[in-house]
Every structure is written in structure tokens, then in C-alpha cells.
Amino acid sequence: MNSPADPLAALPLRDDLRGMSPYGAPQLQVRVALNTNENTHPVPQDVVEAIARRVGEAAGALNRYPDRDFTDLREALAGYLGHGLTAENLWAANGSNEILQQLLQAFGGPGRSVLSFAPTYSMYPLLALGTGTKYIAGVRAEDFSLTAESAARQVREHAPDVVFLCSPNNPTGTALGLDVVEAVYAAGEFHDMVVVVDEAYAEFARAGTPSALTLLPGRARLVVTRTMSKAFALAGARLGYFAADPRLADAMRLVRLPYHLSTVTQATALAALEHHASLLATVADVKRQRDRIVSELSRLGLDPAPSDSNFVFFACGSDAHAMWQGLLDEGVLVRDVGIPGHLRVTAGTEEETTAFLDAVSCYLGRS
Ligand SMILES: Cc1ncc(COP(=O)(O)O)c(C=O)c1O
């Protein structure tokens, strides 16, 4: 039922959308915004120029629809990922959110289900809802870890059509062992389950963390998704992609909107891939700031989780909202992900990280 205050109450919405809230990380004007896990480093000037050049060249042909199969982009993405992948293994869309939505459109839907392991990326239940897929929130251990044994047992118990494994996991930050991916895939093999490993933050992983890309050979229903929104510092460009068996990539044509990747998006992403070394040069700095946050928060008596991503999830005492507000009062916006006693902060530039750590010290000194 809708509350009387629901402004959408008068609309003939689908029953399952009634009373729901949209995704809504606050977009506040603050001095230091560290709440949506962007790469806060600006796009390097050589990349800005390359994008402007490519888009400028493409502009004259904007009277025509774009290359529907974005062949050049798929080739370039395959080249970037390596692992022997070719254009046929690749698919792309407007952000990895759209990728995940297309996967549910094709393999989820009414009468089908998707399993994930909470707490995890907050868009998964919303994408399930929008595609009419039943969402099953699996569980993790108390310290938010997930073992191969537990994950496989939950797959056998629920027999979902699709599993979303987020690695590194948002909001907790830690990567999954490949044994978890292997066990989940094997547990769903008998009913042709599709396993999606969301590697949005893979480029930030600590040394020695393998990608699920290495597991693709021989697994026709394994999908590894990536994005240019994080390490590539191109959240505004909206480009997500996946690698999988060519038949699975091909199936996306059944559900994508015609010409879903604009000529401008394709040109931007191609320029970014040509200059990926320059774009990814900030990753090392972000990782340094991330590690600095983990060690400084520990020193301040808080309890940060080990992070393979560009953010840190930390236990901050009983009143997370009070701390969130205290940091905001200092001009620093972090994310209250709704997990009692915890907050999540994006690792920004050195200056932003210093501002965050100073605000934490200041808050702890006051409280
Ligand atoms: C785990 C995870 N997957 C996917 C996304 C979606 O990113 P985008 O749609 O910008 O590619 C995000 C964004 O925060 C994320 O945290």
C-alpha cells in the first residue's frame, strides 16, 4: 500500500512498484564528495583532447544511427582485457547497470529468480524488481565474508536462474576467492544457471587477486562484467561491458534497445581505451590513499574491512548516522549504506583523503 505522502500514489503503477524508492545516492554540493565510488581524479588532459577529437570526427555523421554492433569498440575492449578474448566475447552498454539489466532481461524475468549475497550492491534488488525477476538475498558470515561452501549450499537451496557475485564486493570492499566462483558455477551447472561476476572495481584489487576472466574458458554461462566508471575515471561517459562465451554475448541482441550505444559513447570509449595507460595512471594513487584510510582508521580505533576496491567500509561505533552527519558538517560526504554501525568512504585524491581523515579525527574528538 502507498503511504498518503507518496506522490506517485495516484498513478496506475505496476503493483510491485508501488511504494518503492528509486536508487538515490545523495548528489549534494559539498567540498569533498566521497560517497559514490567514482575516481575523483579529473580526466587527464591528453585524454580530454583525444575524446574531443574522436567525438568531433564522429559528429558529422550523427544524422545516422550508430554502429549497432559497436564492432570497433568490442575489439578494443577485448584487446584491453587480454586473456585471449576476442570481439565476439565482448558486449557493452550504457554503464554496467545496463549490462546487469540486460542480463536479467535475457536470463531472469517473470517466474525466474536471481540470487546474491547481502550486503552487496544496492542496485541488484532494484534491477530484479524492474525486470520482474524474484530477488533472493543470500547471506554472508558475520564478518561479511563468503566461503565457497556456504555460497554453493545457498545455490543448491534456492536453485536460482542467475547469481550475481560482486567481487570486489560493494559495499564491503573485499574480493571473493575464485574458489567461490568455481563452486557457485558448479552448484548451478545441473540447472543451467547463469553466473555473473561483477568486477566493477577489479583494477583496484590488491596484488595477487585473480580476475574471474581466468575462469571463462569452458564455462559457457559465466559472465564477467566491468565498467569505465571507476578505474577509468569516466563515470559520466556511461560505459559498462562484459566478457563471456560468444553465444551469451550474442543473446544480448534480443533484449537491447536498437542502437543502444550512441556514436558519441562509442567514440568516447574508443578514445579512452587508446589512452588507457594515461587514465589508469591514477589507480596506483587511489590504492595508496585507500591503504592509508585503512591504516589510519585502524589507528583511530575504528575497524575498516580489507579493501580491493577504491573505497573502504568501516565499523564506526553504534551511531553511524551521527558520524555521517558529523563528517558532512565538516564538508565531507561519505555513504551511509544502511548497515548499522558502518559507513563507506571512497578513496579520493591525497587532499580529499586528508580532509576525510581530519574530519574523522575531529568528529571522534568531539563525540
Ligand atoms: C558493484 C557495482 N557494480 C556496478 C556498478 C554500476 O556502475 P556503472 O553503471 O556506472 O558502470 C556499480 C556502481 O557503483 C557498482 O558499485
Image (cartoon, rainbow, N blue to C red):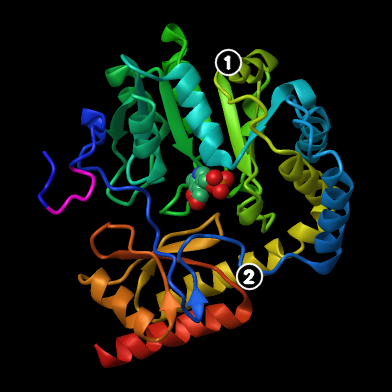
* Disc 1 Cβ-to-ligand 1 distance below 8 Å: no
Q: Amino acid at mark 1?
A: Leu
Residue 55 in sight: yes
Which region shows up in magenta? 5-9
Judging by the rendered image, the residue that carries numbered circle 2 is 288
Does 185 sit left or right of 38 as displayed?
A: left
**Image quadrant in which the N terminus is located:** top left
Which x, y percent locates residue 151?
37, 30
- Helix, strand or loop at mark 2: helix
**What residue is shown at x 23% (from left), y 60% (from top)?**
340
Which x, y percent locates residue 159?
33, 16
Q: Mark 2, mark 1: which one is toward the viewer? A: 1
From the viewer's side, name the closer residue of 125 and 346.
125
Measured in 3D between alpha carbons, the distance from the residue under mark 2 to the one under mark 1, in whole angstroms, is 43 Å
Please tell me how crowded label 2 is: few (under 14), some (14-19), or many (20+) other residues with Cα within 10 Å. some
Between discs 2 and 1, the one toward the N terminus: 1
Judging by the rendered image, the residue that carries numbered circle 1 is 254
- Identify the mark at residue 299; answer none if there is no mark: none
**What residue is shown at x 79% (from left), y 36% (from top)?**
63
Q: Amino acid at mark 2?
A: Arg
